[in-house]
Image (cartoon, rainbow, N blue to C red):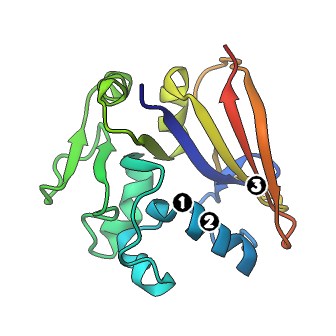
Amino acid sequence: MRKLVYYVGVSIDGYIAGPGEEIDFYPVSDDMAAWMNERYPEVIPTHIRAHVGLTDAPSKRFDTVVMGLGTYRPALDVGITSPYAHLRQYVVSSTLEKIDDPSVELVSGDPVGLVRELKAESSGKDIYLAGGGKLAGALLPEIDELIIKWYPVVAGAGIPAFQGGFDPTLFTPVQRESFSNGAQVTWFQRTA
């Protein structure tokens, strides 16, 4: 069965973005960027791939992306309706009325039901949960793996990695990589 994987960058204090959805405060080093591009090229949005030499890079881990409106909106704001054209794209939103791109499916209902249907497919690749925190909180019961990019910065306020009710959920760390900027990537598997 396919996994739902939340691959996300967070500050020391657990924020995935600032209060105005800023992400430019994360210190990314050349070695970390090269590692991310090599290991997970499909998480790079389509309009950026050519700029980092990934135009024709095959998907290694994911073939589907699920994102909330907060993750999708920055692309829309610059006229991009299909930010991950190289993946199957789903936008979960109860406020967006329509998407003017046939390659992006709007899901206004139950995100858990959507993910369960996607997990039951047999594609050989996993599902990338791109964010945000509200959607991650709603999908916590379905998240099988976390890939957390921990950046050595305190944001102080912003969008939390998980937003929702109190629901302690155990994950086990299984691997860690460190980079010259002080950041670490840690893989966590859901604890059975």
Q: Residue at 62% across / 65% down in the picture? A: 36
Q: Residue at 47% across / 83% down in the picture? A: 53
- Please name which of the two marks, 1 or 3, marks the residue nearer to the observer: 1
User: What amino acid is labelled 3 in the image?
Assistant: Ser
The residue where tag 1 is placed is 40
User: What amino acid is labelled 2 in the image?
Assistant: Met
Estimate the spatial distance between the alpha carbons at disc 1 and disc 2, rounded to whole Å: 6 Å
User: What amino acid is labelled 1 in the image?
Assistant: Tyr
Q: Position of residue 146 (x, y in %)?
A: 63, 38
Estimate the spatial distance between the alpha carbons at disc 1 and disc 3, rounded to whole Å: 20 Å
The residue where tag 2 is placed is 36
The earlier-in-sequence mark between 1 and 3 is 3
Q: Circle 3 — which element?
A: loop
CB contact under 8 Å: marks 1 and 2: yes
Q: Quadrant of the C terminus?
A: top right
The answer, for residue 45, to whether it is visible in the render is: yes
Residue in the foreground of this view, choosing between 138 and 186? 186
